[in-house]
């Protein structure tokens, strides 16, 4: 059974990103765990902690990011295979970390909270938002 760990605090600068990334790297590198690090912060700091900006730009262009997942869920007009956007092995300190997976964040997530709230404020039921988006963790090889 998967375990979910969240690092949440409304105050900035308290170490949420650093703690999340370091624990994810430690679990994958030192304990052999499969870790999916989900960077929902539009500042993309966790993503850029592990991926060079040029590599991120190339990846997002070819494979996508969490922005594509939210666009598919909120737009509901096209399918989304988020597993295609998940980086299977990312690096920390220049070393590849097997088992550490990352669906990269995107700067355009800045407005996703407003888009998520819109059905609630417009009188639509959140359950009316449907999509054919498939979410699956990478399989072990």
Image (cartoon, rainbow, N blue to C red):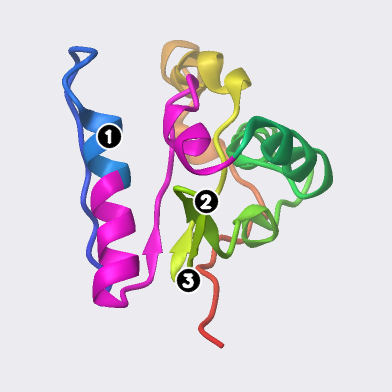
Name the disc covering residue 98, or none: 3
Question: Which disc number belongs to residue 94?
Answer: 2
Residue 18 picture quarter: top left
Does the magenta run of residues contain 61?
no
Q: Position of residue 6 (x, y in %)?
A: 22, 43
Q: Is residue 13 left or right of residue 65?
A: left
Q: Quadrant of residue 35?
A: bottom left
Q: Is residue 39 left or right of residue 73?
A: left
| Residue 119 vertical placement versus 95 (above, below) | above
Residue 37 spot, x, y in % from top left: 40, 51
Residue 3 is left or right of residue 58, and the answer is left
Number of other residues with Cα within 10 Å of mark 3, as a class: few under 14, some 14 to 19, many 20 or more: some
The span from disc 2 to disc 1 (Cα, nearest Å) is 17 Å
The mark that comes first in sequence, 1 or 3, is 1
For the C terminus, which image quadrant? bottom right
Closer to the chain start, of discs 2 and 1, is 1
Label 2 vs label 1, nearer the camera: 2
Percent position (x, y) of residue 111? 54, 14
Mark 2 falls on what kind of element?
Answer: loop
- How many C-alpha atoms fall within 10 Å of the one at disc 2: few (<14), some, or many (≥20)? few
Q: Which residues are magenta?
A: 22-51
Numbered disc total:
3
Residue designated by label 1: 18
> Which of labels 2 and 3 is toward the front?
2
Placement of 64 over or under 140, stated as above or below? above
- Secondary structure beneath dot 1 equals helix
Residue at x 74% of width, y 45% of height: 59
As drawn, the residue found furthest toward the front would be 94
């Amino acid at each position: 059974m998967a375990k979910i760990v969240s690092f949440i605090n409304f105050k900035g600068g308290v170490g949420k990103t650093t703690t999340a990334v370091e624990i994810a790297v430690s679990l994958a590198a030192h304990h052999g765990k499969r870790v999916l690090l989900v960077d929902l912060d539009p500042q993309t700091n966790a993503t850029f902690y592990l991926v060079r900006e040029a590599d991120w730009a190339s990846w997002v262009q070819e494979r996508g990011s969490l922005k594509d997942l939210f666009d598919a869920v909120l737009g509901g007009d096209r399918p989304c295979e988020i597993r295609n956007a998940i980086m299977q092995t990312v690096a920390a300190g220049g070393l590849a970390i097997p088992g550490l997976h990352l669906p990269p964040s995107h700067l355009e997530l800045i407005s996703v909270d407003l888009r998520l709230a819109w059905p609630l404020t417009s009188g639509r039921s959140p359950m009316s938002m449907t999509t054919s988006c498939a979410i699956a963790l990478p399989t072990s090889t």
